[in-house]
């Protein structure tokens, strides 16, 4: 089988240097023929043993390379299996974490966690005046219908009208800061069990 390349070692130079140019040239033709599957020329008595030495070296190098190639293939195969095993382990860890959370929280907390992780529509109006120029969206206060629908979606006991009245009275602020997300405010009322009949308690809520 023809080889794409072969190695010549410098420590063989001394043996080649004592040969005539003709013998050395024939030797190298024989070397190329041996590695490419060509016709090996007739060698002189002095070149024949040196040629045998070169051939043995070429065969050792080829065997060594083949062994290295097989080891690399095996390492790559094992590496692929290890990646699959790691991916499976990560999935199992996530599953265990989900079971752990499920076992450690109440039913109401589970519902709250699942609801809060849903994508919530943005509480900003991109069409507000100057929004495009400033590069920032402005807060848009909700209608009573918006609040009713969100409270119904959440299944809480927050009084929508009391929520609207409370924040209309204080200029839609959370403490001293302008409100940024009215849905988050409803969830705060929900977590603090505020139905809307205690304005003083609602005034102390913060996001």
Image: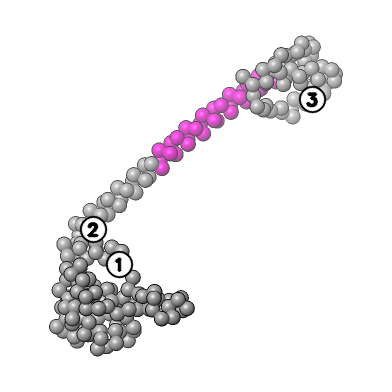
Of residues 13 and 115, the one drawn nearer to the viewer in this rendering: 115
Is residue 2 visible in the rendered image? The answer is yes
Is residue 194 visible in the rendered image? The answer is no
Which of the two discs, 2 and 3, sits closer to the camera? 2
- Asked whether 64 falls inside the magenta stretch, the response is yes
Residue 101 got which mark?
2
**Residue range (magenta):** 54-83
Relative placement, left or right, of 89 versus 165 is right
Q: Is mark 3 on a helix, strand or loop?
A: helix
Q: How far apart are marks 2 and 3 (CA)?
A: 77 Å
Rendered residue at 82%/23% (across/down) = 17
Rendered residue at 32%/78% (across/down) = 140
Q: Within 10 Å of the Cα at label 1, are there few (<14), some (14-19), or many (20+) other Cα atoms?
A: few
Residue 14 got which mark?
3
Rendered residue at 34%/83% (across/down) = 178
Q: Are marks 2 and 3 in contact (CB under 8 Å)?
A: no
Of residues 52 and 159, the one drawn nearer to the viewer in this rendering: 159
Q: How far apart are marks 2 and 1 (CA)?
A: 22 Å
Give the image location of residue 180, x and y in percent: 33, 78
Dominant secondary-structure state across the stretch colored magenta: helix
Earlier along the polypeptide chain: callout 2 or callout 3? 3
Relative placement, left or right, of 172 versus 2 is left
Q: Do the residues labelled 1 and 3 touch (CB within 8 Å)?
A: no
Task: Answer above or below: position of 12 versus 43.
Answer: below
Give the image location of residue 161, x and y in percent: 18, 81
Residue 120 got which mark?
1
């Amino acid at each position: 089988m023809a080889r794409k390349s072969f190695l010549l070692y410098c420590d063989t130079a001394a043996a080649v240097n004592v040969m005539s140019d003709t013998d050395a040239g024939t030797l190298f033709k024989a070397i190329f023929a041996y590695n490419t599957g060509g016709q090996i020329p007739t060698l002189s008595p002095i070149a024949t043993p040196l040629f045998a030495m070169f051939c043995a070296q070429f065969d050792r190098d080829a065997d060594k390379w083949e062994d290295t190639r097989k080891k690399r293939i095996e390492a790559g195969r094992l590496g692929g299996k290890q990646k699959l095993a790691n991916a499976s382990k990560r999935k199992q860890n996530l599953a265990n974490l989900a079971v752990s959370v499920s076992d450690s929280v109440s039913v109401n907390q589970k519902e709250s966690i699942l609801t809060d992780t849903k994508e919530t529509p943005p509480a900003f109006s991109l069409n507000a005046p100057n929004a495009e120029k400033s590069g920032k969206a402005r807060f848009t206060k909700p209608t009573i219908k918006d609040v009713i629908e969100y409270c119904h979606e959440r299944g809480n006991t927050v009084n929508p009208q009391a929520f609207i009245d409370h924040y209309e009275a204080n200029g839609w602020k959370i403490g001293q800061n302008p409100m940024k997300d009215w849905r988050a405010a409803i969830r705060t009322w929900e977590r603090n069990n505020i139905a809307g009949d205690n304005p003083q308690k609602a005034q102390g809520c913060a996001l």
